[in-house]
Amino acid sequence: MEEENTNKEKNSQQLQQQDPLSELLDAYGNYDACSWSAIPPKTNEQQLIEASSNGFLMEVRTLLTKEVTINCQDEQGETALIVSSRAGHGEVVKELLNREANPDLQNNQGWTALICAAHWGYLEIVDTLLVKGRAMIDTRSHRGWTALHTAAHWGHVDVLRLLLEHSADCMIQDFDGRTAKDVARENEDIEILTILDEVWLSTSLFSYRLTLEYTK
C-alpha cells in the first residue's frame, strides 16, 4: 500500500512537470480577467479603419456621426478609404466619399485608394473614385507605378479602358523607366498591348501635330 502511494506521488510530480500551462503560470503569474483592463480601448479612428476594411457599412455610418478624423492614417499609412477600396467594399467607399474622405492620400508604399482598386480590378470602385472622388489619376507609388501600370500588369482590361477614358497618361515611366505598355509586354498580354498601342499611336500623332503647329 505504501509503495502504491509512492508511485502515485511520482506520477503526479511527472504530470505537473510536463504541464506547459503550469510552467507559464509559475513563470508569469496567475493573471485574472481584471489584468486586461490595462489594454486601452480602440480609438474611433481605429474602429473606422477596421469597420471599413470589413465592409461594415452601418458601423461606418455610426462612427461617422461621432468625433472622428475621417482621413486618419494608421502606422502603415492606411486610411478608411484605402482599406475599403482594397477590400472591394463599394458602398463603404461611396459613404466615405460622401463625407469628404481624401482619395489622394498614400499609404507607406505610396498606394492610393485608386491604385488599390485598380490592382484588384474593382471597376465600379475605380469609377466611383474617379467620378465622385475626383481622384488624381496619375499618382505614382513608391515603385513609380500609376493605377494604369497596375491594371496593365494584372490584366484588368475593363479597368485599363476606364482609366484611359479618364485620360490616364500612358507615357508615364516608373522608376525603372517602364511605361504601362512595357509592363504589359513583359507579361505578354496581347489584349492590353493592343489597347495601349492604339492609345500610344494616337498620343504620339497628337504630339507631333502640336509640334508642327508650334513651329509654323
Image (spheres, grey):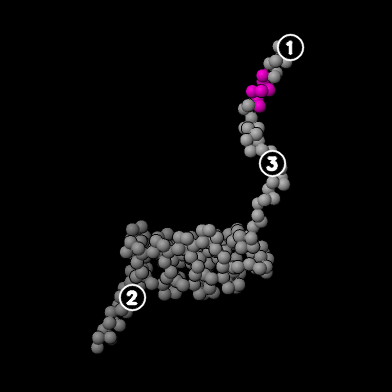
Q: Is residue 140 left or right of residue 77?
A: left
Q: Looking at the image, can residue 61 be seen?
A: no
Q: Disc 3 or 1, which lies upstream in sequence?
A: 1
Comparing 103 with 152, the one in front is 103
Cα distance between the residues tagged 3 and 1: 38 Å
Query: How many C-alpha atoms fall within 10 Å of the one at disc 1: few (<14), some, or many (≥20)?
Result: few
Magenta segment: 10-16
Cα distance between the residues tagged 3 and 2: 69 Å
Q: Disc 2 or 1, which lies upstream in sequence?
A: 1
Is residue 13 part of the magenta span, yes or no?
yes
Image location (x, y in percent) of residue 170: 37, 70
Q: Is residue 31 left or right of residue 102?
A: right
Residue 215 placement: quadrant: bottom left
Cα distance between the residues tagged 2 and 1: 98 Å
Above-or-below relation of 207 to 8: below
| Closer to viewer: mark 2 or mark 1 | 1
Image location (x, y in percent) of residue 110: 45, 63
Residue 16 placement: quadrant: top right
Q: Is residue 101 left or right of residue 211?
A: right
Q: Residue at x 66, y 56 (%)?
A: 41
Give residue 2's mark.
1
Give residue 31's mark.
3
Image location (x, y in percent) of residue 179: 34, 65
Residue hosting label 2: 203
